[in-house]
């Protein structure tokens, strides 16, 4: 029986960590790209050499709900698959991330002088990945 991980790769309206700017994702950002049924990879730390699954292969699933972008993945019986399972199980990896191309965003300078970016439309969804250091602290991954 395979091991499975699941979590939120993105949470709507939750601020990112400071990356030179603070970023948020609009609740409708994935509407268009989800209609295309993209082949989304699940990678450890966005590393293409650490493939865990993919939607086209049926080993990963993605969906959007009122909170954000959800993913789940049946982990492979490989070194990286077993390592990710153990690290998530131990609580060493608790967050996720998503690789994407935005086709529409809104940049603003807010009252305190900070730069913000709101992702309004994602045109390409590349991966949903468990990561050691997520840009968004509100993301998750569990067994």
Image (tube, helix red, strand yellow):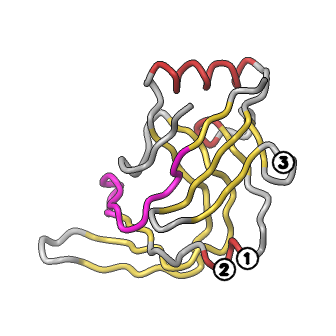
Mark 1 falls on what kind of element? helix
Mark 2 falls on what kind of element? helix
Would you say 30 lies left or right of 113 here?
right
Q: Which mark is residue 35?
A: 1
Q: Which mark is residue 58?
A: 3
Query: Dividing the image into 4 quarters, which one contains the C terminus?
Result: top right
Q: Mark 2 = which residue? A: 32
Structural crowding at the residue carrying mark 1, measured as other residues with C-alpha within 10 Å and reported as few (<14), some (14–19) or many (≥20) = few
Q: Position of residue 60 (x, y in %)?
A: 74, 46
Would you say 41 lies left or right of 28 here?
right
Looking at the rendering, the stretch of residues picked out in magenta corresponds to 7-22
What is the distance, in whole Å, between disc 2 and disc 1 at their CAs?
5 Å
Whether label 3 touches label 2, CB < 8 Å: no
Position of 48 relative to 14 (above/below): above
Q: Residue at 47% x, 33% y: name it.
A: 132
Mark 3 falls on what kind of element? loop
Q: Residue at 78% x, 23% y: name it.
A: 1
Q: Residue at 46% x, 43% y: name it.
A: 140
Position of 78 relative to 13 (above/below): above
Structural crowding at the residue carrying mark 2, measured as other residues with C-alpha within 10 Å and reported as few (<14), some (14–19) or many (≥20) = few
Whether label 2 touches label 1, CB < 8 Å: yes
Structural crowding at the residue carrying mark 3, measured as other residues with C-alpha within 10 Å and reported as few (<14), some (14–19) or many (≥20) = few
């Amino acid at each position: 029986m395979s091991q499975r991980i699941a979590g939120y790769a993105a949470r709507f309206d939750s601020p990112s960590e400071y990356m030179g700017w603070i970023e948020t994702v609009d609740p409708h950002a994935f509407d268009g790209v989800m209609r295309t049924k993209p082949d989304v990879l699940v990678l450890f730390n966005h590393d293409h050499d650490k493939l865990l699954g993919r939607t086209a292969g049926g080993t990963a699933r993605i969906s959007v709900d009122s909170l954000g972008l959800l993913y789940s993945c049946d982990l492979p019986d490989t070194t990286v698959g077993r390592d990710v399972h153990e690290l998530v199980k131990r609580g060493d990896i608790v967050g996720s991330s998503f690789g994407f191309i935005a086709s529409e965003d809104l940049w603003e300078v807010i009252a305190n002088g900070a730069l913000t970016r709101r992702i309004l439309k994602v045109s390409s969804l590349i991966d949903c990945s468990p990561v050691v250091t997520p840009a968004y602290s509100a993301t998750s991954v569990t067994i």
